[in-house]
Amino acid sequence: MEGGKDAGDGFLIEIRWHGRGGQGAVTAAEILAHAAINQGWYAQASPSFGPERRGAPVLAFNRLDKEPIGIRSEVYEPDVVIVIDPNLLWMVNVLDGLKNGGALIINTRKSLNEIRGELGVNCRLAVIDARKIALEILRVPIVNTTMLGAAVRVIGLVDLHYVLDSVRERFGKAGDVNAKAVTRGFNEVTIGEQVE
């Protein structure tokens, strides 16, 4: 992760995305895996659905490694947790299993200090008003590509240009505008350090 592990060490990074049906968490995880593979990593993306309806809580998972990945289960002890829908902070335990030294990335208008105070977290924390960016660029409050950009910056393992290429490939005609959302997410995320 940014300022953390060396990407050449051949270790496993596990990521858990929290969103709702229709918000694009699964798509963001798939794009991240695709970009990582294009960069030369081994990568997985997988979804986990509750009641299959729009708006229901959804989990998506990534695993990234320099070695082949044999694990196929959900991610129970993530290195990184990404929260696309901030209302889920009060509905599910997004911190469940987060590794010591792990990172939490939240779509919120609140500051690092406000979130730290409300959640009582001492992990590495990153915040971004992804909804504002999505409305400005995409004209709809779909934040998955903005959050993908923030995640790429915080995780620090997959080069941004591979992600932008994957976004353009995935979204076709809407690729360039979604690539702008990724880039703004990458540039505008506010990252705090772990509090001891």
Image (spheres, helix red, strand yellow):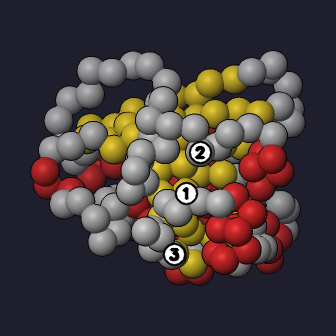
Q: Residue at x 27, y 53 (%)?
A: 39
Residue 104 circle label: 1
For the question of whether residue 181 can be seen, the reply is no
Residue 85 circle label: none
Q: Which one is in front, 106 or 123?
A: 123
Q: CA distance from mark 1 to mark 2?
A: 8 Å
For the question of whether residue 90 can be seen, the reply is yes
- Label 2 crowd bin: few (<14), some (14–19), many (20+), radius 10 Å: some
Q: Contact, CB < 8 Å: mark 1 with mark 2?
A: yes
Q: Contact, CB < 8 Å: mark 2 with mark 3?
A: no
Name the residue beneath numbered marker 3: 191
Residue 95 circle label: 2
Left/right placement of residue 92 relative to residue 74 reads right
Counting from the top left corner in percent of width and height, residue 19 is at 72, 43
The three-letter code of the residue at mark 3 reads Ile
Counting from the top left corner in percent of width and height, residue 170 is at 55, 47
- Label 1 crowd bin: few (<14), some (14–19), many (20+), radius 10 Å: many
Q: Which one is in front, 150 or 95?
A: 95
The three-letter code of the residue at mark 2 reads Leu
